[in-house]
Amino acid sequence: MRISFQSVYTAFNALRRNLMRTFLTMLGIVIGIAAVITMMEIGNGAAKQIAEKISNMGSNILMVFPYAIEKAGVSTGAGTGVTLTSEDCEAIIRECPSVRSATPVVRGTDIQIVYGNKNWSPQRVESGSEMYFDVNEWTVSDGEPFSARDVAVSACVCVIGKTVADELFGDESPVGSQVRLNNVIFTVCGVLSPKGANLMGMDQNDNIVIPWTTMRNRLSRSGGTASTSSVSTEYSRGDVYSLSEVELYPARDASQTENYLMPIRFNNINAISASAVSADAIESATSEIAELLRLRHRIKSGAEDDFEIRDMSELLSTLTSTTELMTGLLLVVALISLVVGGVGIMNIMLVSVTERTREIGLRMAVGARSSDILVQFLVESLILCLLGGIFGILCGRAASEIISSVNGWPVSPSFFAVVLSALVSASIGIVFGFYPAWRASRLNPIDALHYE
């Protein structure tokens, strides 16, 4: 079966004879294709917007916690051990290619910020290195973030969230102002860009970020500012913290030093927050971090890890699958309208075969074969669907832009949707046009010539 130029020309002439009927027949395909394009572009736009929202929450973030210690057989929970140090974080940055950046984390509790005669207890007081803002993909809208030098010298500087800035400073710029955190004077160096609420409804802007060394050395009760009431008065605080020649512990031999790590108190951190280069690299980043930490902590093969790595991959997978399901449902609804349009084409083609029975008989009488009749009606059906597909693609793109501009919905143009629509249009033309074409090709020439 071969499609010739004459077959296409004859099909166009036949369709041009009844322009209104041709237009109404195409309308079903136009609406169906436009619905497919619009639904897929809105679905893709929604998926991208959800991905951006999750990214703002830290979808690529990996949290590394120390192991849980037990007291009298009772676990005190993850993060209570002292197996992680800032050197581990630096090693992760250097030796894990799937990790974009990482920062140590030291937690602080019951911290209140005071400015003048106003005070506020933020939901979170967070700490980290200068990479904290890159790890959490958080920018500073006013001022600037603290620097690596601030981290190195345990500088009393902080970056505050938008909620904290509004509560304490109102319309005044807080940059350069001095505030008190638990009676320690801090200078505000920047204000974080607003992010809104997270999935749990918590205000992400109600926070303060300070250098992790400052948290450990100046604010944290587990750091260098711990109470000295239990320390012997024979030595100063610096003496107790091994700055003198007094040996507080027995010396370790070479074998003990090699095989058994002794965590250095006040050098440990509560956690490490790392960011993978992309959401797809979370799994590889997790394995690289685990392998590196096992090597650094000299954990024997088969032994349990002295750390725990957590990520948001489960949340990301759930939201992504939900978005894909909704897009699929929208696509199914649009494809149903295409099937309805295909049924309309089959109906019109059957009517056309009935009206042109004498024409078919005449063509057969002068030498046309059954295959020629089959090709003629198939080409007519294919042209109807392809023209409907072209107009449907244009209408779908226009509808997407109109919906985006009027309702503010995100849309994302999809080349795949355009190609799929073209293929579906051609398939509908062939599938729903075959039976009328086959029926026309099976007519008896003598009966066709006598048909009234």
Image (cartoon, rainbow, N blue to C red):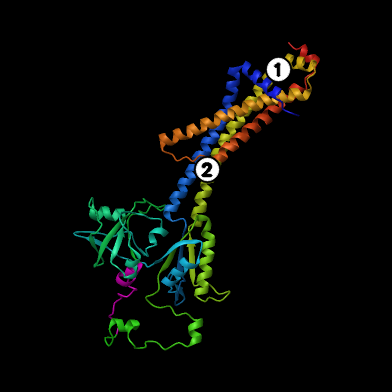
Q: Quadrant of residue 87?
A: bottom left
The stretch of residues the image draws in magenta is 212-231
Residue 301 among magenta residues: no
Q: Is residue 133 left or right of residue 60?
A: left
Residue on which the image places disc 1:
354
The N terminus: image quadrant: top right
At a point 50% along the width and 34% down the height, the residue shown is: 397
At a point 31% along the width and 70% down the height, the residue shown is: 153
Q: Tag 2 or tag 1, which sits nearer the N-term? A: 2
At a point 29% along the width and 77% down the height, the residue shown is: 227
Residue 238: x and y in percent read 30, 81
Residue 340: x and y in percent read 60, 29
Secondary structure beneath label 2: helix
Mark in front: 1 vs 2:
1
Residue on which the image places disc 2:
326
- Distance from Cα at disc 1 to Cα at disc 2: 43 Å
Q: Residues within 10 Å of mark 2 (few under 14, many from 20)?
A: some
Q: Nearer the viewer, residue 65 or 177?
A: 177
The overriding secondary structure of the stretch rendered in magenta is loop
Q: How many numbered badges does the structure rendering display?
A: 2
The C terminus: image quadrant: top right
Q: Is residue 282 left or right of residue 195?
A: right
Is residue 274 visible to us here? no
Q: Nearer the viewer, residue 416 or 339?
A: 416
Residue 103: x and y in percent read 41, 65
Q: Nearer the viewer, residue 139 or 22?
A: 139
> What amino acid type is highlighted by mark number 1?
Thr
Secondary structure beneath label 1: helix
Q: Is residue 151 left or right of residue 42?
A: left
